[in-house]
Image (cartoon, rainbow, N blue to C red):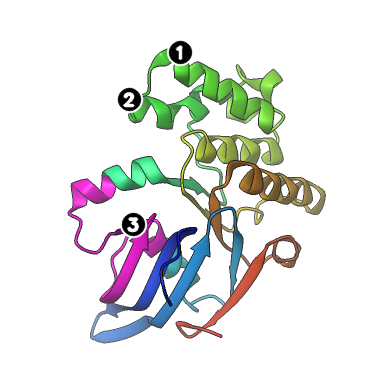
Amino acid sequence: MSATTTAVIELHGVHKTYRLGEHVIPALQGVDLCVERGELLALTGPSGSGKSTILNLCGLIDTPDTGDIVLGGQPVNGLNEVQRTLLRRDALGFVFQNFNLVPVMTVAENVDYPLFIAGVSAPERRERVAAQLKAVGLQDHAHHRPDALSGGQRQRVAIARALVKRPKLVIADEPTASLDSHTADQVLDLMRERCHAEGAAFVIATHDSRLTQRCDRVLALLDGSLL
């Protein structure tokens, strides 16, 4: 697999194992993967197939045993923990199954928080938060707390929070698992629209066939290998 100018993240010959007591468990076995700018990619497969391991590697939360990872044209294997943390802060967004919103913060404050951590000025933060809340249809809920929102609205907040810092890549772990069918369809349509509008790539681990039908590409994993 060769690097391209539109590649957001690339995995080259990645192997990863975990140790459980005396047992060594192979999680990934020579995975090659290239995700393009503006692409919505779904990873499917049974539990234990390696989906979460790929998310952890793409999210710079874990490191491979062997093989290379390139994010936005930058090799990341040799980065120290501080460098990885800064790159994760600046280049990545995350959407979780259970939303992971801060309950004592308002909707606007939750979306603003990544920008605050990144040191963005207050005027720019206000402008970008307002734009993202409008994009996900929650501009009228800016001052509400998460517990006043439905599950679908909370996931919309999570998507806005992931995109507000204009990341290269968004990592999403089962983002529709906690939602009913109608709400999941709305969230999936929003993710697809925002992915293409923002130009960020999405890598999504899912068991949800409704989600895979809306993705640009679907890759299946089994026993740590892409099929």
Give coordinates of residue 72: x percent, y percent: 39, 54
Near-viewer residue (60 or 27): 60
* Left or right: 171, with 155 as reference point: left
- Give x and y (percent) for residue 121: 38, 17
Among numbered discs 3 and 1, the one appearing first in the sequence: 3
The residue where tag 1 is placed is 123
> Which residue shows up at 42% across the image and 79% down it?
31
Q: Where does the image place residue 40, in percent across and percent down from the top left? A: 62, 58
136 or 107: which is nearer to us?
136
Residue wearing tag 3: 60
Give the answer, above or below, for where 225 lies relative to 183: below
Tag 1, which secondary structure? helix
Q: Give the vertical position of 159 relative to 79 (above or below).
A: above
Q: Residue at x 34, y 83 (%)?
A: 25
**Residue 192 falls within the magenta-colored stretch:** no
As drawn, 5 above or below 136: below
